[in-house]
Image: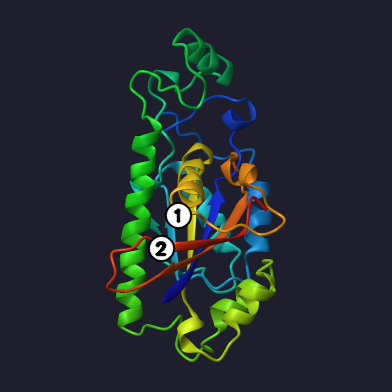
Amino acid sequence: MTHFTLTFVRQGQTRLNKEKIIQGQGVDEPLETGFKQVAAAGIFLNNVKFTHVFSSDLIRTKQTMHRILDNSKFCKDMTVTYDSRLRERKYGIAEGKGLTELRAMAKVAGEECPLFTPSGGENLDQVKMRGVDFLKCLCQLILKEAGQKESCSSGTPVNCLETSLAEIFPLGEKCASKFNSDSEASKLVASVLVVSHGAYMKSPFNYFLTDLECSLPATQSKSELASVSPNTGISVFIINIEKGREVKPTIQCVCMNL
């Protein structure tokens, strides 16, 4: 069994976030109001050793990722992979309009948000498929690299990833003992950072909970996993995958929306 952590961070707040304007993919505003949030997130994560970093290719997520890495003690020079599969949900004609207008559109159509799909927008199944495809490709990448026996960095203890995570995240006794054991099979082979968007992140989180039956900490509820992450909210998952088997990964939620 191969194990890695997946850390999601929502992008920092923009002016339109604050004013409850739908941005989607077409209205891509710089952070402006969220730089202090992003700096705080970067400081919070500065001791975590990430092995892979991915971001949506929209401006607000790029800026968020850059600020986080600028504060990192270990990842300043890492190459970011920008992936369009991590973009915000596309809201079509509702982009640039207020949340109240989107709700009014949904009411006219006899539907509820977020199930309602504005003209030219993505439905929830389309957003889900983007997330599932990203996770599948990520798991394949981690398995390939694990098979090549690539370590997190030269001369670094094998438990470097576990130690850096355990310093700030509530791994819990079961998880901590598992990753502090002497067994190589229990070690984390990668620590992945993903910066994305609020409405988009709801989709993979819901997939983790419903399709993959993600286990939750005692302090978290299913409603929290299904809620929209706040700007710069941090959520951490442990992904367990097995090479050579066409089975879905098992997932453990470490924390949500810190």
Residue extending furthest right?
219
Give the side of residue 192 with respect to residue 139, left or right: right
**Residue 128, image x and y in percent?**
39, 42
Position in image of residue 23 (x %, y %): 48, 29
Q: Which mark is residue 212?
A: 1
Mark linked to residue 138: none
Residue 204: image location, x then y, percent: 46, 47
**Can the viewer see residue 34?**
yes
Per the image, label 2 sits on a secondary structure element best described as: loop
Taking depth in this image into account, of 147 and 167 the one nearest to the observer is: 147
Cα separation between marks 2 and 1:
7 Å
Question: Where does residue 144 sit, x and y in percent of width and height?
Answer: 29, 74
Q: Nearer the viewer, residue 186 or 5?
A: 186
Task: Name the residue type under label 1.
Answer: Leu
Decide which of tag 2 and tag 1 comes sooner along the chain: 1
Colour pattern of the rendering: rainbow
**Residue denoted by label 2:** 249
Q: Is residue 71 depicted above or below 93 in this figure?
A: below
Disc 2 crowd rating (10 Å Cα; few below 14, some 14-19, many 20+) is many
Q: Residues within 10 Å of mark 1 (few under 14, many from 20)?
A: some
Q: Are circles 2 and 1 on residues that touch, CB within 8 Å?
A: yes
Local SS, label 1: loop
- Where residue 117 sits, quadrant-wise, is top left
Residue placed most toward the observer, 122 or 69: 122
Q: Residue at x 29, y 69 (%)?
A: 245
Residue 231 visible at all:
no
Residue found 51% across the figure and 50% down from its top:
209
Residue drawn at point x = 41 percent, y = 42 percent = 87
In this picture, residue 161 sits left or right of residue 173: left
At label 2, the amino acid type is: Pro
